[in-house]
Image (spheres, rainbow, N blue to C red):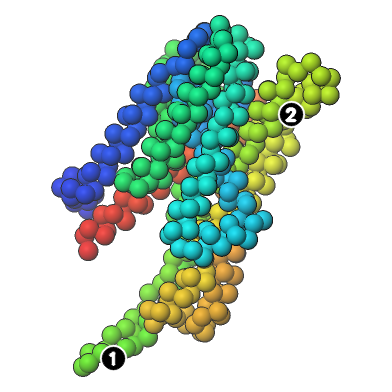
């Protein structure tokens, strides 16, 4: 307890750390203010009814940070940016020049790669904005829009998404944590008072089993996320003795902690972004007069969280993206080179290429455990919903998974900042 208060005091007294926290809070306040500004011509009653009866838009609302529930100027949220980032990451596998740009050209290459992701966000936001406005207009939620009104609404939605992307990047650069994840987290947390009030007004004795199910699933998800996020595989490392002048340095032994889940919550976000596409296209084609297009829309719209195919694909995508994101962000060869430069080695393993292969082999094994566990945690709410028939469990489980992962990531980065200042 004393250690906690010491660290809390350090957070308050250290100007740089305090400014980082205040910057994040300020960015969240700006985001929440923007989420309350709706685009023109909305029937709020029809919008609320439509969103309550549609699982797809419930998930999409999570990625918009709650902006979609009000059709605000940031109704697209960071969804287009996440999709653009996924596409660019996938292209590194197929395009050697992009792979070299990301991995071999250092910080300048990564900045250029990030710029391509931002540019790709614009057309993706335009497509998504047009699709949503067209769909909501057909449902009677948006009314009396002229051609100029359509263009203006689409432009506002694109601008809002780009502005939110900029805020997210500012949080990552000048604050603490991943900006995109924090924006999604803030939108989910902002909806908590609404859900609590609904619970208080609808609570009855007959609904007690429902809330017990919610509690059990919630505790299982929280325990699973914490277990996988905190699990590490230590690799022993020894520093060789070096003589400088009259003094001998090194000769110490330590360990290198490899996280079981290096990717964090990113695979969940990536997988959900991919799974949103079939339903989005299906909703867009629903009003088509062409018989073939109408049949395609029915097939795509049926691809919902109720189907076992959706559950299976969700698990597979989370599994694949865990491996993929770990491979992109963690380079065993670079780690081996850094150890060799600092006179460190893994006992029983030759420095250089042999160390890189050893670390890569261990990373592959522990990532298998992390990917399987994260996939099971992700589909657990869907499986519970299939067994109980309670729709809200799936959305609540997804939100809980993201919130717990983001909080754990924030705590770790805060501890890293505090440790750096203590030393």
Q: Nearer the viewer, residue 228 or 79?
A: 79
Q: Secondary structure at mark 2?
A: helix
Q: Nearer the viewer, residue 300 or 162?
A: 162
- 301 lies left or right of 253: right
Check the image and name the residue furthest to the front. 148
Relative to 60, does residue 325 appear above or below in the rendering? Answer: below
In terms of image quadrants, where is residue 311?
top right
Q: Secondary structure at mark 1?
A: strand
Q: How many marks?
A: 2
User: Which label is found at residue 300?
Assistant: 2
Check the image and name the residue furthest to the bottom. 246
Where's residue 231, x and y in %?
47, 57
Relative to 254, does residue 199 appear above or below in the rendering? Answer: above
| Residue at position x 53%, y 35% in the image | 122
| Residue at position x 48%, y 58% in the image | 109
Q: Nearer the viewer, residue 82 or 403?
A: 82
In terms of image quadrants, where is residue 139?
top right
- 6 lies left or right of 391: left
Relative to 367, does residue 344 appear above or below in the rendering? Answer: below
Whole-number angstrom distance, CA of label 2 to CA of label 1: 68 Å
Where's residue 374, x and y in %?
57, 48
| Residue at position x 28%, y 54% in the image | 417
Where's residue 58, x and y in %?
56, 25
Q: Quick one: quadrant of the C terminus?
A: bottom left
Q: Which residue is mark 1?
A: 243
Check the image and name the residue furthest to the left. 13
């Amino acid at each position: 307890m004393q250690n906690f208060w010491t660290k809390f005091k350090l957070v308050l007294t250290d100007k740089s750390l305090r400014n980082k926290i205040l910057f994040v809070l300020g960015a969240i306040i700006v985001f929440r203010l923007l989420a309350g500004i709706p685009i023109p011509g909305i029937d709020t009653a029809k919008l609320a009814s439509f969103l309550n009866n549609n699982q797809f838009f419930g998930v999409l609302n999570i990625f918009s940070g709650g902006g979609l529930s009000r059709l605000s100027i940031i109704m697209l949220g960071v969804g287009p940016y996440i999709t653009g980032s996924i596409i660019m990451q996938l292209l590194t596998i197929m395009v050697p020049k992009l792979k070299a740009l990301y991995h071999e050209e250092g910080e300048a290459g990564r900045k250029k790669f990030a710029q391509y992701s931002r540019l790709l966000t614009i057309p993706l936001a335009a497509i998504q904005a047009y699709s949503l406005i067209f769909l909501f207009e057909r449902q009677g939620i948006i009314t009396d829009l002229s051609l100029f009104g359509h263009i203006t609404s689409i432009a506002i939605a694109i601008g809002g998404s780009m502005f939110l992307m900029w805020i997210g990047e500012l949080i990552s650069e000048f604050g603490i944590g991943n900006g995109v994840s924090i924006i999604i987290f803030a939108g989910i947390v902002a909806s908590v008072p609404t859900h609590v009030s609904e619970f208080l007004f609808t609570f009855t004795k007959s609904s007690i089993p429902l809330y017990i199910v919610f509690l059990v699933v919630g505790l299982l998800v929280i325990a699973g996320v914490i277990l996988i996020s905190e699990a590490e595989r230590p690799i022993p490392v020894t520093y060789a003795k070096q003589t400088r002048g009259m003094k001998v340095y090194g000769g110490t032994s330590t360990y290198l902690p490899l996280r079981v889940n290096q990717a964090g919550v990113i695979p969940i976000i990536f997988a959900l972004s991919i799974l949103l596409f079939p339903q989005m296209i299906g909703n867009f084609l629903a009003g088509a007069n062409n018989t073939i297009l109408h049949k395609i829309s029915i097939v795509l719209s049926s691809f919902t969280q109720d189907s076992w195919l959706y559950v299976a694909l969700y698990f597979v995508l989370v599994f694949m993206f865990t491996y993929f994101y770990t491979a992109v962000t963690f380079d065993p060869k670079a780690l081996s080179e850094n150890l060799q430069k600092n006179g460190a080695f893994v006992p029983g393993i030759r420095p250089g290429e042999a160390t890189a292969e050893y670390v890569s082999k261990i990373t592959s094994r522990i990532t298998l455990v992390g990917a399987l566990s994260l996939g099971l945690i992700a589909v657990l709410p869907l499986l519970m919903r299939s067994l109980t028939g309670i729709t809200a469990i799936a959305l609540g489980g997804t939100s809980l998974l993201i919130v717990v992962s983001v909080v754990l990531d924030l705590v770790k980065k805060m501890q890293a900042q505090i440790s750096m200042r203590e030393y």
